[in-house]
Image: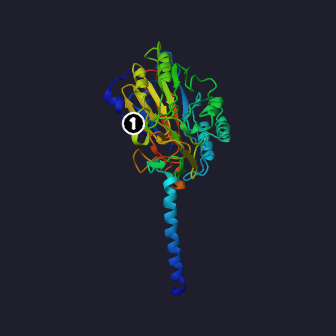
Amino acid sequence: MSQDPDRRRVLECLGWAGAGLVWTLGGGAANSVLLGQAQAAARGATPFSFVQVSDSHIGFTKDPNPDARATFGEAVEKIRALPQKPAFILHTGDVSHLSRPEEFDDAQQILKQAGLPVFYVPGEHDMLDDGAGQAFSERFGKDALGDGWYSFDHGGVHFVGLVTVKELKAGGMGHLGEIQLAWLKADLAGRGASTPVVVFTHIPLWTIYADWGWGTDDAAQALALLGRFGSVTILNGHIHQVLTKTEGHVAFHTARSTAFPQPAPGQGPAPGPLKVPAGQLRDLLGVRAVSLVRADAPLAVIDTNLA
Amino acid sequence: MLKTLLPRAAACLAAAVISTAVSARAAAETPTVRIDNFTFGPQAVTVHAGATVTWINGDDTPHTVVAADKSFKSKVLDTNGKFAFTFATPGTYSYFCGLHPHMTGKVVVTER
């Protein structure tokens, strides 16, 4: 395993197919593309890719995007056009804007066009029905545990979906809670440290900007449980822009929205939809493809905008 | 022209002054808290028991108003959405936005 801290910190940025960017973390795609399949197979992991979409906010109709359904549809077209068929899609929350049944319906119908399994975790905008998230759970979380968390394995990678938007406390940020953390501890126990782990959730597990609530109060406890694993990739939404950080073996990636961008942390008086000219909107929306190319290396994460 | 307008303007001004006085008195017992830029303003309001506080969301992001002790909770307020709650019992009521819990405010209710 490449542990050279300098190499790990290196963030390379390569053009990709004329649209979007390839982000690779140290020891990532450049090596992986050359060495990928044989090594992954040798370590019991099967190379595959999956897609992350986030913050579709179906029902949003305001500036700068009068039709979040249309841009979500464009995102699905991007997924359909990917050269390598992904195994599945992760939706990291804020599926809807106001938790209305027709918003969930439309999101589901649009995403169905991708023809792939979809795994959801809720955002705070999906908690706004009278049942405080019941509508989301009944539709998207049938197989989930507790308040909506779950895990599954694919191709030798362990995927963990966490809920950061339930039981939020006055003055706080995102929240996992003791019950979910206890479940996570049990879920990870007994798994080999060489198992690549992908955690997906809505609110970032690193504090990006506390004044805007862009973080999770008790994330440190989750990160402590993940610390012994050699490759941890944490994917989230909520802030509607691509930000990346690597800490040891843990790579954090926030995703673009398919509906509207938000300001950079602390830029302006508040978060919320960033008003941009219509011609620039699609530059700031996007989807993300993630590939496992080597079981002992960081996953290759490719963000593509909708332009 | 000017002659005819001036008395009207004066009358309007007087009416405006009266209405401001009335609304100021009313505001003491039916205050409005605006939600702008992810902030409750004013952050703290003081009312007598029996007063009704109204919240109006001026953001293009939805918010909610939730008591820290769960004694009241609004439905989601989209842009220009309103929520009103009548405080019958004296006390200090801390509240927050259920979507963005870093947004906090309080209502202090005094004896009549």
Any part of residue A116 in sight: no
Residue A27's spot in the image, x, y percent?
Answer: 39, 27
Image quadrant assignment for residue A146: top right
Residue A192's spot in the image, x, y percent?
Answer: 45, 14
Secondary structure of residue under mark 1: strand
Vertical side of B31 occupied by A152: above or below = above
Q: In this view, does A129 lie to the left or right of A35?
A: right
A153 and A30: which is toward the camera: A153
A73 and B87: which is toward the camera: B87
Q: Callout 1: residue from which chain?
A: A
A276 and A98: which is toward the camera: A98
- Residue at figure coordinates x 42%, y 31% from the top left: A217
Residue A97's spot in the image, x, y percent?
Answer: 59, 43
Q: Tell me the quadrant of the picture where the N terminus of chain A can be found.
A: top left
Extreme top residue here? A190
Residue A291's spot in the image, x, y percent?
Answer: 50, 29
Q: Is residue A118 left or right of residue A235?
A: right
Any part of residue A93 in sight: yes
- Residue at figure coordinates x 49%, y 64% from the top left: B21
* Residue type at numbered disc 1: Glu
Q: In this view, does B60 lie to the left or right of A219?
A: right
Give the residue pinned by disc 1. Answer: A12
Vertical side of A188 occupied by A101: above or below = below
Image quadrant assignment for residue B73: top right
Vertical side of A188 occupied by B2: above or below = below
Residue count near mark 1 (Cα–Cα under 10 Å), binned few <14, some 14–19, many ≥20:
some
Extreme front residue here? B112
